[in-house]
């Protein structure tokens, strides 16, 4: 194992304006298809948390969150993009995002 990162976000602290700073182009397409405002906020919270967890797993202090994208598998699980794998030094990246009422937690494992 190379690194493990975890992050938790309080959903109500997430504002829609953050989407411009954290979402890559492919994530924006997913986000724009979400109609319900609360679901949009949870999506943003999840993407923010998973990218913070990635930074912790890689022990990097700053990077452009828009460059690390987590897309969706057929069952909705987060899947790292090729660019995200590049950021991780071509290592395997596994991610999980969980939503529970007021909070979103994300875990990233880099192998």
Image (cartoon, rainbow, N blue to C red):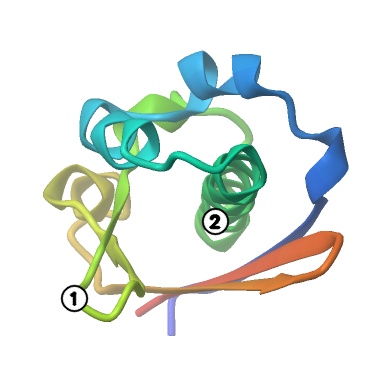
Of labels 1 and 2, earlier in sequence is 2
What kind of element bears circle 1?
Answer: loop
Q: Residue 98 location in percent, x, y?
A: 62, 75
Q: Tell me the residue that label 2 is attached to.
A: 50
Nearer to me, 2 or 65: 65
| Left or right position of 46 against 110 | right
| Left or right position of 25 against 68 | left
Q: Residue at x 60, y 58 (%)?
A: 53
What kind of element bears circle 2?
Answer: helix
Nearer to me, 32 or 22: 32
Q: Residue 20 location in percent, x, y?
A: 48, 14
Q: Residue at x 54, y 49 (%)?
A: 43
Q: Residue at x 38, y 27 (%)?
A: 66
Q: Residue 1 location in percent, x, y?
A: 43, 85
Q: Quadrant of residue 90?
A: bottom left
| Mark 1 and mark 2: Cα distance apart in space | 18 Å
Which numbered disc covers residue 74?
A: 1
């Amino acid at each position: 194992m190379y690194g493990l990162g975890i992050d938790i976000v309080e959903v109500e602290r997430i504002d829609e304006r953050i989407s411009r700073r954290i979402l890559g182009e492919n994530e924006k397409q997913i986000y724009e298809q979400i109609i319900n405002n609360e679901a949009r906020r949870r999506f943003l919270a999840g993407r923010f948390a998973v990218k913070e967890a990635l930074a912790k797993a890689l022990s990097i202090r700053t990077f452009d969150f828009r460059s690390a994208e987590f897309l969706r598998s057929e069952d909705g699980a987060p899947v790292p993009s090729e660019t995200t794998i590049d950021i991780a030094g071509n290592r395997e990246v596994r991610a999980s995002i969980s939503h529970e009422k007021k909070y979103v937690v994300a875990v990233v494992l880099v192998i």
